[in-house]
Image (spheres, rainbow, N blue to C red):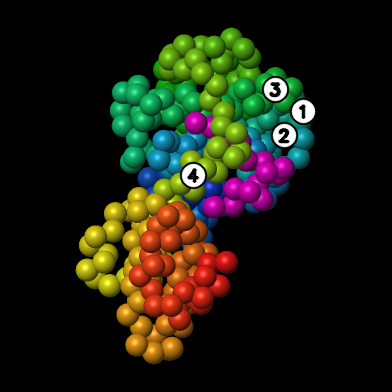
Amino acid sequence: MIIVVDALNKHRFSALLDEMHKLRARVFHDRLGRDVTVRDGKEIDSFDHLDPAHVICLDAEGDVVGSMRLLQTTGPHMLSDMVHALLDDDAPLRSGQVWEATRFCVDTQKLSDGKTRNSISYVTSEVMIGAFEYARDAGVLDAVAVIDPVMSRVMTRCANAPYDYLGAAKPMGKGTDIAALIDCSDERIAGIRAFAGIDHDVFLSEDDALDIFNRNRDTAIGSAKVSHLVPHQTKAAITLVPDALKTALQLYCFEQMRDAESQTDLDAALALMEALSEEFGTAKASELGRMMQSLPRHSRTQVQATLN
C-alpha cells in the first residue's frame, strides 16, 4: 500500500517520514555499509531538504517496509552533485520530464522471500508501480537511477530492466554503481504489475494511510503511558483492545473514587480519570451510568463535572 509524501502533505506525515528515514539507516548504513550520515537512528541527506516526493510502502500493520525518493533534475540532485563521475564527464541531465530516483530500499528483515504480499519481491514491485505511476501522471517521461549490480538484477527479474545507461559502471565507495535510465511508460508499469500479480490501485488516500500507520501505534503508546498508573493485578486483567482498555481503566478510576477516604484521595482519582479521558475518550454511556450508581452521592457531582 503506497502513500506519496511530498511538499504539499509532509506536514501530516512527520512520524511516518521518521520511520522511513529509520528504515533507510538500517538498509544503507547498517546492512549495506554505505557512507551515509545517520543521526538519532535516521538517515537524512541534503537532498531530503529539497522537497522530493517520497514513495512509501506500508504493510497491513502500518509499518514502513519500502520507499523510494523522487527528485527533479532541474535543480541539485545526486547524479549532478555527488556522483557526477558516473557520467564519464558528460553534462548532468537537466529536464522537467526526467526525475532522479534514489534511496530505494525495502525491509529485508521483516519481509519474506517468495511473491506473497509480505515478500521482498511484492513490496519492491509495489514501490516501483507507485513511483512510475506517480511520475507518469506528473508528466515525467524518464527516471534516472544510480544502481548497483544487485539492484540491476532485481529490476530485470521484476520486468523492470533499464532501457539504457549513462556512462560505465564504476567503483563507488564499497560497491560498484551505474546510472540507469528507466522510462515511466504504461508498458513498463503493466509489465511490473503482471510480474507481481498486482491489478489493484496501489495508492492509499492520505486519511487511510494515517489511519493504518497510527492504528497500532496509538494502542501501544496509550498502553505504555498508563501502565505505571494501574495496579499490578489490574494490568494482568487488561487486554490491549482499545474499548476493553478504556473500560477497564475507567472502572479502576471509579473504584478509586468509590473507596476514597478523603477529599485528597477523591481529587487524585478525578485527576487520573480526566487524564485518561483526554487520552482515550470515555466509555459508553451505559457503562458510565452503571459505574456512577456505585459512587457516593457527594462524589457524583464532581465526577459528572469531570466528564463534561
Q: Is residue 259 visible?
A: yes
As measured in the structure, the alpha-carbon distance from the residue carrying label 1 to the one carrying label 4 is 35 Å
**Which amino acid type is shown beneath numbered disc 2?**
Thr
Residue to which mark 2 is pinned: 73
Q: Nearer the viewer, residue 29 or 189?
A: 189
Residue 183 is inside the magenta segment: no
Q: Earlier in the sequence, mark 1 or mark 2?
A: 2
Q: Residue at position x 24%, y 60% from top?
A: 237
Label 2 sits on a secondary structure element that is loop
Q: Residue at position x 39%, y 78% from top?
A: 296
As measured in the structure, the alpha-carbon distance from the residue carrying label 1 to the one carrying label 2 is 6 Å
Q: Earlier in the sequence, mark 1 or mark 3?
A: 1
CB atoms of marks 1 and 2 within 8 Å: yes
Q: Is residue 199 above or below residue 220?
A: above
**Which amino acid type is shown beneath numbered disc 4?**
Phe
Residue to which mark 4 is pinned: 213
